[in-house]
Image (cartoon, coloured by chain):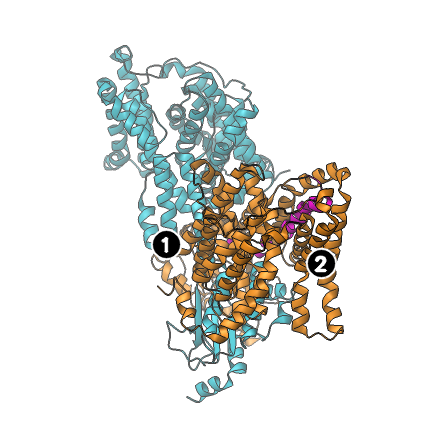
Chain colours: A orange, B cyan
Amino acid sequence: MRNYLPILKWGREYNRSALSSDLLAAVIVTIMLIPQSLAYALLAGLPPEAGLYASIMPILLYSVFGTSRTLAVGPVAVVSLMTAATLGKVASTGSADYASAALTLAGLSGLILIVMGVFKLGFLANFLSHPVIAGFITASGIIIATSQLKYVLGVDAGGHNLLELMSSLVGHVLDTHWITLLLGVSATLFLFWVRKGLKPLLKRLGAGEALAAALTKTGPIMAVVGTTLAVWYFDLANQGVNVVGAVPQSLPPLTLPSFSLELTKSLLVPALLISIIGFVESISVAQTLAAKKRQRIEPNQELIGLGAANVGAALTGGFPVTGGFSRSVVNYDAGAETPAAGAYTAVLLAVAAVFLTPLVYYLPNATLAATIIVAVLSLVDFSMLSRTWAYSKADFTAVLTTILLTLGIGVEAGVTAGVLISILLFLYKTSRPHVAEVGLVPKTQHFRNINRHSVVTDPSLVSIRVDESLYFANARFLEDYLYDRTVACPDVRHLVLMCSAINEIDMSAIESLEAINHRLKDIGIQLHLSEVKGPVMDKLEQTHFLQELTGRVFLAQYDAIKTLTPSLCEADNAA
Amino acid sequence: MRNYLPILKWGREYNRSALSSDLLAAVIVTIMLIPQSLAYALLAGLPPEAGLYASIMPILLYSVFGTSRTLAVGPVAVVSLMTAATLGKVASTGSADYASAALTLAGLSGLILIVMGVFKLGFLANFLSHPVIAGFITASGIIIATSQLKYVLGVDAGGHNLLELMSSLVGHVLDTHWITLLLGVSATLFLFWVRKGLKPLLKRLGAGEALAAALTKTGPIMAVVGTTLAVWYFDLANQGVNVVGAVPQSLPPLTLPSFSLELTKSLLVPALLISIIGFVESISVAQTLAAKKRQRIEPNQELIGLGAANVGAALTGGFPVTGGFSRSVVNYDAGAETPAAGAYTAVLLAVAAVFLTPLVYYLPNATLAATIIVAVLSLVDFSMLSRTWAYSKADFTAVLTTILLTLGIGVEAGVTAGVLISILLFLYKTSRPHVAEVGLVPKTQHFRNINRHSVVTDPSLVSIRVDESLYFANARFLEDYLYDRTVACPDVRHLVLMCSAINEIDMSAIESLEAINHRLKDIGIQLHLSEVKGPVMDKLEQTHFLQELTGRVFLAQYDAIKTLTPSLCEADNAA
């Protein structure tokens, strides 16, 4: 029971000191979350209040079911983009169907996460390789930033990939609304300056590191306050500047997502992708922060916590959520000690939703877009391309494909292609394992690649080391390799397969070994094994292979050489 | 050039002795092929002459481009079944569209094989694991045998999976034509007796092994001659026994397959599956026979040879073909020395197609069905189920899924599911690698699993050996494992990762190692590596990981222990 309700663990140790730390962190995170929530709702194509609602109940539920003490759950950039891309296919932005589909998407995503958690399927997320995630996040950052340019320009444009977005923007560039552009660009430049220049300035003015860092985080709220006042004072809303407008003063409403067959069918795959991407993003933040305090994250319980958060979003007018990087770091840095900090944040956000929404009436959309652009551009990082280029062409191919397809076609295509191509390249790599012919290093009992080292060999004996487990995809490769190596050499009497790097042999590989044994027997060559690992030997003993083996199984490669070609060892010892 | 035309190699050594061996083999194979060709055309749902045509030009072309000296190419049971299953979806059996689609299917299959050969994509066939092939062939054998029962009963039934076939047969069982049934059952029993009883009988009568074996192979032709004479003598065709009827007396016609977009689209995936299944079946026969004479098979050139054979089938009124097991063994046993034997077989079959077709007018379809049933039942072998059950549950799951889906849904679904499930299970297995905590075996420098062996350890040092390459699918698993192992133990100061079984580390795993290093650092634990393989070390040196590593890289695990916990080694030496 306590495994499924982590709150029972930390709740009983809760004390006054934790309370005051958590409250302080909650205030700071709330100030940060208000503009962020509104902005990500805009990005997802939903009304601004949806962003607030998506930050209240989900945080509360995560604080009950989640295992991270400092993770802050809510709308995040990449998941909001994926939400917009998905919903755009089933309804038109701004329609009631669109908001209703957002609830279904959050609900499906929540149920998928819970099912994955209950059945311990968290390992599925492992198939998103790091290079694919890096490529996907970089490309998403570019798409998100581009998608927000329309608010900065004050024009009507759209699209779900870079090509569509750019051509739409270019087509509308002559409609640019200059006052909006001025506001948007000012906010953007201000936010960039806050990031780069404010902290050094504050420190020069004598502020401590912590204070300087905290004030730097208030950049978005300062931009929001400044531009809202400007719009109000100069009456810019009546001059065509798009503003957030009337936001209902209300607690999150109770909503029931529709799970009609048709809608579920078209949202199921996107919901799965959103769940997995969200989980991967969230768990790595949670683990990094937990490690700093020797705390543990249970990946499968995290799935349940995030699942509950998403079901909460679906039931209270929100949209898909996950643990966010920047807000969690702020929460951690602000001193949050338990998930109660999240609960207090939720309460403060609820108060804001009821009392403060009139204050954002004059907040220009361009400012929200500016906060998004500045936030996501920090996600854009092409260094994975150069790192993988140097390290592994397979990984490079996976990153490049993910980036190009995400930019060129869309987020769903990009991430799916990335996953498939990493799996295919991995299979291809293991299907052509590294195989070395080895010889004895003189005066030792070690064996090394004959092409890399000066070693001694005997023409009657060939020793082959395979640096990979044997399974169906490389079984035939080995068959071909060994047969090719021996068929042209009538002197060969013994073939020793050195199995030190073989961690597993599957049924296909057993049958290939049987075929190799049989074919070598036909041409008068004995097959021997050496250095077979314990677990592999256990499995071989369950088959007929060892009885049919024409040669022997040697514990060590040197034993094989000593037994089969004693003259070689004698000569080496005598030399 | 000679690589692409193997005929240039063996052709220049051709002599009189090879000629006479090849001619003899050709005669024997022709006698065997005539009933087989007619029968497989029946199975594929095509007119009988298509079977002969599919055996003439393909054999000729294979003898020019193929690398096996004894492989006999033509229609085979499993590929004919797949052909019928595919064509049944695009046209109705017996229609002109059906025969025309068969040409397209052969043409596509040929082109796919040639492309695979030219681009050296033969490794794709490796993803069909042995258990999946065994399950697929067994299930196909059952479906084929069941599909032929309608000819033995003389009723009109159909279906492409076992359920459809059985329910259709049961629905028509009251229409059974008793004379046909008598003929069919007699032929079946006779053929079974020939297989089991004739050879011992002949040997008791004093015949030599070779003669007895050769006569046993003439069973089908004897059944054909016997039942044809019976139908002719008793005028059974007029009493409702279905016979082959008029077959055009002609050389193979020149045909041009249609590659219309729609047809190509619906046949492309089946053609790919047929190509790969056919290639896998053919190459294993070819390799087994070649090994007996120290001959070599070039898999990629084999693709070209089989591709040419299929293109030949498409251009001369045939249907998809491949190298057959039983006919190749007969060819080999009969003494064929070069692919010229195939060419002579083609000539003899052409002579038969022109002059002998009137003789099969009264041949009952029930006899052809009997030859198919007896031939395919030898393919049915459920032993793979018990073997894999004992050896590996993953392999067992793959076989069972393949068998059930092939029987229950159809050949295409069965083989596709088999391939996908083997890949998924392989990925799942490698995503949860075997990880052992190891300790020092007293008085040695060896390290073994602490749970299996009596070893010594020091509380400040944890040694972990991972028995798998590190890649994206298991990178997070390792992260979780190492963090879980150390977070609860405040005594631990050193974690040594023993890398002796790690053949490869991809970019995701590097990043995971960086995260592990970072998190362990946060809780005051140094990360060390030991026994890193040369190629893996080469790659690690291209990254920043080694500079960031808090600990050291030790050549041997014992060095790590000696350096980090000298007291342990001293105590052990002193003990």
Q: Locate the C terminus of chain A by quadrant.
A: bottom right
Q: Are marks 1 and 2 on the same chain?
A: no
Q: Is residue A560 above or below residue A431?
A: below
Amino acid type at mark 2: Leu
**Image quadrant in which the N terminus of chain A is located:** bottom left
The answer to which of B293 and B378 lies nearer the viewer is B378
Q: Report the chain holding disc 1.
A: B
Left or right placement of residue A179 versus residue A505 in this view: right
For image coordinates 47% across by 73% down, the residue present is B486
Mark 2 crowdedness (10 Å alpha carbons): few <14, some 14-19, many ≥20: many
Mark 1 or mark 2, which is nearer to you? 2
Residue where numbered disc 1 is placed: B392
Instruction: Let me know if residue A215 is in the magenta part.
Output: no
Secondary structure under the numbered disc 1 in the rendered image: loop
Q: Amino acid at mark 1?
A: Ser
Chain at tag 2: A
Which image quadrant is residue B185 in? top left
Q: Which mark is residue A191?
A: 2
Residue B217 shows in this picture:
no
Left or right: B508 as drawn, with respect to A366: left
Secondary structure type for disc 2: helix
